[in-house]
Image (cartoon, coloured by chain):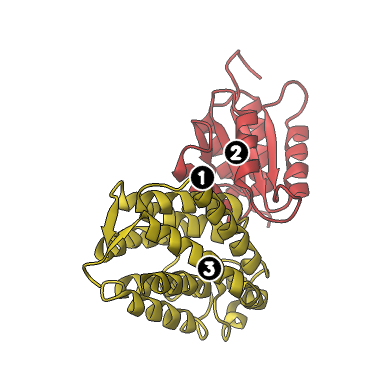
């Protein structure tokens, strides 16, 4: 797989698969968010990814970077909650890092996503262990150096690992100790993003 | 307003439309008689729900932009992150628009009062930020 080159069509398939996955899991995301957040994560992510698919269908960028920049911009403008600017910055910054190249390797994607994850950390001021999407994203991007499958597994394990954590960012942090015992909705949707990536890379 | 210079515009971004509208009205009211700096509210989502909308924020910023810069004050959570992301993006806000680190209500009053008095963007930003220092006990 290490020699696989990924083109714009691959990235459109990734975003489309992510949208389908978010739609499938919207109820679960909102349920997790009703435990420690404001019960809108599923709906917000669904609205965002519906808009992403729509814009990619209307005007398909020619480069992988362009696909991610367009998707990120759409998430920022259509999600309505904090996950909009966070996921939007993740994809947009990753897309900018990929530049104009018509094809990228898995390693180039890993490096691009690393830039995106750094942007998320900077925007939200969070670090791994704070019970946020970073707890899934950071291990996933590291494991993407090995394979798409490993990245998806690392993201899923990272999301599960947020259960015993004490939330230190966002609305859940107001709950203090009561945030312990619940899986973070943002880490869960981040795992969906990497599961979709592994699915289209098969 | 003093002199003929264009005023700084103020945008108030809240999760709630009514909160943003009410704070804008209060700040303009407390700025006193005479011409006040342009203030626009960008609260909630376009369909009237709770949340943050880049569409409403962008429209509000363009509405109050007189060429002297736009100070954007925000309440919390996605309002903060959305405006930060919009500033980083760079193409959805007028040139000279900036996120101001200030308490929402007190900062809005300070910003509108100083902007109405003809202060430039740096002075408006500083006045709004100083509102963090007004202790209440």
Mark 3 or 1: in front is 1
Q: What element carries label 2?
A: helix
Please provide percent x and percent y for residue A91: 43, 57
Using the rendered image of the protein, determine whether residue A177 is visible from the camera's viewpoint: yes
Relative vertical location of residue A48 with respect to residue B26 in this rendering, above or below: below
Pointer 2 residue: B58
Dots 3 and 1: beta carbons under 8 Å? no
Q: Left or right: A75 with respect to A197?
A: right
- Residue drawn at point x = 70 percent, y = 40 percent: B41
Pointer 3 residue: A169
Mark 3 and mark 1: Cα distance apart in space: 21 Å
Mark 3 and mark 2: Cα distance apart in space: 27 Å
Please provide percent x and percent y for residue B78: 59, 56
Quarter of the picture containing the C terminus of chain A is bottom left
In the figure, the shade used to draw chain B is red
Q: Mark 2 lies on which chain?
A: B
Quarter of the picture containing the N terminus of chain A is bottom left
Q: Residue B86, labelled with which disc?
A: 1
Chain letter for the part of the structure drawn in yellow: A
Relative vertical location of residue B45 with respect to residue A129 in this rendering, above or below: above
- Residue drawn at point x = 43 percent, y = 80 percent: A158
Q: Mark 1 lies on which chain?
A: B
Relative vertical location of residue A88 with respect to residue B72 in this rendering, above or below: below
Could you say which is closer to the camera, residue B85 or residue A145?
A145
Could you say which is closer to the camera, residue A108 or residue B106?
A108
Mark 3 or 2: in front is 2
Using the rendered image of the protein, determine whether residue B77 is visible from the camera's viewpoint: no
């Amino acid at each position: 797989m290490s020699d696989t080159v990924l083109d714009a069509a691959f990235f459109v398939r990734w975003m489309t698969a992510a949208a389908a996955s978010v739609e499938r899991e919207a109820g679960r995301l909102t349920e997790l968010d009703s435990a420690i957040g404001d019960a809108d994560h599923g709906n917000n992510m669904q609205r965002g990814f519906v808009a992403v698919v729509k814009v990619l269908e209307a005007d398909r960028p020619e480069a992988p970077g362009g696909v991610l920049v367009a998707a990120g911009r759409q998430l920022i403008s259509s999600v309505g909650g904090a996950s909009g600017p966070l996921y939007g910055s993740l994809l947009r910054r990753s897309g900018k890092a990929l530049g104009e190249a018509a094809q990228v390797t898995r390693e180039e994607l890993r490096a691009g996503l690393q830039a995106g994850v750094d942007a998320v950390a900077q925007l939200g001021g969070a670090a791994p262990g704070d019970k946020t999407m970073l707890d899934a994203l950071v291990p996933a991007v590291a494991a993407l150096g090995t394979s798409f499958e490993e990245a998806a597994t690392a993201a899923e394990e990272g999301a599960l690992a947020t259960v015993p954590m004490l939330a230190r960012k966002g609305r859940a942090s107001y709950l203090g100790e009561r945030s312990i015992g619940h899986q973070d909705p943002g880490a869960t949707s981040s795992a969906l993003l990497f599961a979709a990536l592994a699915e289209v890379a098969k | 307003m003093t002199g003929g210079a264009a005023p700084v515009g103020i945008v108030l971004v809240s999760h709630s439309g009514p909160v943003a509208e009410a704070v804008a009205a209060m700040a303009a009211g407390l700025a006193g008689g005479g011409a006040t700096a342009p203030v626009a509210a960008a609260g909630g989502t376009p369909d009237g729900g709770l949340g943050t909308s880049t569409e409403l924020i962008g429209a509000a910023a363009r509405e109050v932009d007189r060429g002297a810069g736009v100070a954007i004050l925000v309440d919390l959570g996605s309002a903060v992150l959305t405006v930060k992301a919009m500033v980083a993006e760079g193409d959805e806000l007028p040139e000279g628009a900036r996120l101001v680190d200030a308490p929402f209500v007190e900062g809005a009053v300070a910003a509108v009062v100083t902007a109405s008095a003809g202060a430039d963007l740096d002075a408006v930003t500083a006045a709004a930020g100083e509102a963090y220092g007004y202790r209440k006990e």
